[in-house]
Each structure stands twice: as structure tokens, then as C-alpha cells.
Amino acid sequence: MKSGVSSANKEAITTFQEGHRVDKESLKSISEVADQYAILANEKNNNSNLMSTNTSTKHDALKHKVPYNLEYPSEENALSLFDGEWTCAIPGYTGPGNIGLFADHRIEWLIKEIGVMNDMNILELGPLEAGHTYMLEKSGANVLAIEANIDSFLRCLIVKNLLDLKSKFILGDFTKGLGQSNSYELVVASGVLYHMTDPISLLEQISQVTNQIFIWTHYFEPDIQKWNPAIQGQVGLKWKVSETKRVNFNNKIIRIVPQTYGEALGWDGFCGGPETFSNWIYKDDIILILKELGYRQIKVNFDQPDHPNGPAFCLIATR
């Protein structure tokens, strides 16, 4: 039997030496080098087999690298993408959120006041999870909804798929532009005005594209005793009363109070504005701005100064 190293082992040794620093003095023989290479090659083969032969193990190895869902195909699988982040209870499905925005008495009031909505072109700002979109569409309207919050936008698409909505959702910042003049028969802005750093500008933009507005918003109430007792102590802290601004709008003074999101910025499912703060307007001043913008008929409802999250009300403004 001849001693020495086979051509295959020579190739292995060369490859090993090229790919690794080898202290030749620490190796007893050329065969040990080949053994080291064989061990590495064996480990590589084992890892390859681990990824390709066992479906269960393959899933375990990949689940933190590639976002696949390996559950049985189901419409409900999409809901799990936002576990713990859903706000709304979705008709026909259990488990997402618990707020009844798909059967909202505020939108029911709007629909009753407007009357027939068949083929009405509506622009909705900040649809959140498409609850109001759903109600407006079921009433016959054609809805275009713009959402800047990426997670909320994706949840809207999930709902669109689950409930077979025909409404269109667009991702983007609606403060950058709302479209052509008088292009919508109604603009619905529920839960967005109080998230703005420049709420006056948003009202001006809305007034350029419609003669009819629906708004639900929080507002600043100067009489602290009217606030919900649970949050009265935060007035002056969360709501920076000492930093109240008085802004001139068409020679009218508009009072604006900054509020900070604080710890809410870290919540799962946070759906506030893109900044760390926003500006709240006095209720009377919101109405004053709308009148200055030409909305002569203003109906107010659901005025709730003791709302758990701060004073709030609804209005429908018509030119």
C-alpha cells in the first residue's frame, strides 16, 4: 500500500489552505489538514440537508429571515399580521379590535342628514381601518380614502379584501394636496383635525375641494371643570395651555393649544399624527373658521366635553 496523499485530498488541502489560515506547524500531518477540511465539508452538507429535507425544520430556520405565512390559506390569516394593533371590531370576524366604527352613530347621523348617497363622490381623510368607509359605501357612495399611516393603510386593504369593498385607498399625506377644486360632493374628516400641527390649513384645503364637510374632532375647552375628571389633571401638562397661540385668520383671532402625544407614541397601533405633537382649536373657533370659508349652514351634534380623551364634537358644514 502506497503512502501519501491522493489527488482528491491534495485538492481538498489546497482549497482549505486558500480559504483558511493554517498554522502548518500545529498540524501533525497532511492527512490532518484533509480531515479538517472533511469536517467542514460535512458540516456544510449537514446544514444543507437541514434546510432542504425536513419541512418543519426548514420553517423554523426560515421564519426569522423570510416573511412567509405557512398556515392553511384563509382570509383571516391577514388579521394576524397586526395582532394587538387593531382598533375596530370587524363585522363577521372575531378577535381584531373592539371599537364599533363599522356601526358608528356619528356616521349614521351623517347619512340621515345627507339623505340619498347613491353614487355620491366622497373623499375620506384618515380612514384608520375602513370602518366609516364601509358604512359610506353601504349607503351607496363612491369613496376615495387617503391614509398616511402605513400600518393603518395596510389594515384598510385587509378590510377591503375581507369585506369585498369597492372603495379605493391611497397611501400618502393628504395635507400635500386633496385634488381639484370642488371635485367631491362631501369630505369626511373624522378623527384627523386634532392630529394636525396646522389644522387651519387643512380646513382651508378641504374648503377648496367641496361644498360640504363632515368633521368629528377633539377641541380645546377652556373650562377645565367640563373635562372628564380622569384627565383634568393633564390639562397644562399634556395640553400646553401656557403655550396657547392666537392666530390671525381673516382678521379673526383663532386660539390654538398644543398637545403632546407623550407615551402614546410607543403604543402598538398608535394612529396619531406624524409629529410628536398636534394643535387643538377652541370649538367656537373651528366654527368661526368654517363660516369664514363660506360654510353658512353648520349643524352640530354629539358635543361631549367630558369625552375620555378630551372634549369632542361633530358637525356638518354646508355652503
Image (tube, grey):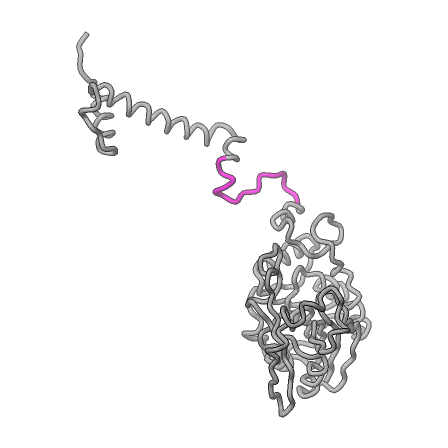
Tell whether position 8 is magenta: no
Taking the spot 69% from the left edge, 67% from the top edge, the residue there is 233
| Residue 72 located within the stretch drawn in magenta | yes
Q: Quadrant of residue 313?
A: bottom right
The percent position of residue 178, horizontal first and vertical second, equals: 59, 75
Residue 142 in picture, x, y percent from top left: 69, 68
Foreground residue among 273 and 298: 273
> Could you tell me residue 302's position as x and y percent?
79, 72
Above or below residue 283? Residue 141 is above
The image quarter in which residue 205 lies: bottom right
Q: Position of residue 226 (x, y in %)?
A: 77, 73
Quadrant assignment for the N terminus: top left
Relative to 6, is 243 on the left or the right? Answer: right
Which residue lies at the image location 63% right of the left edge and 38% below the top edge? Answer: 72
Furthest residue toward bottom? 251
Residue 177, visible in the rendered structure: yes
Query: Quick check: can you spot residue 202?
Result: no
Which residue is nearer to you in this view: 93 or 252? 252
Instruction: Classify residue 106 as left or right of residue 156.
Output: right
In depth, the one of 285 and 59 nearer the eye is 285
Magenta part of the protein: which range? 61-74
* Above or below for 92 versus 263: above
What is the tally of numbered marks visible in this picture? 0
Q: Name the residue at the top extreme.
A: 1
Q: Main secondary structure of the magenta part?
A: loop
**For the C terminus, which image quadrant?**
bottom right
- In this view, 140 is above or below 113: above
Q: Residue at x 75, y 71 (%)?
A: 227
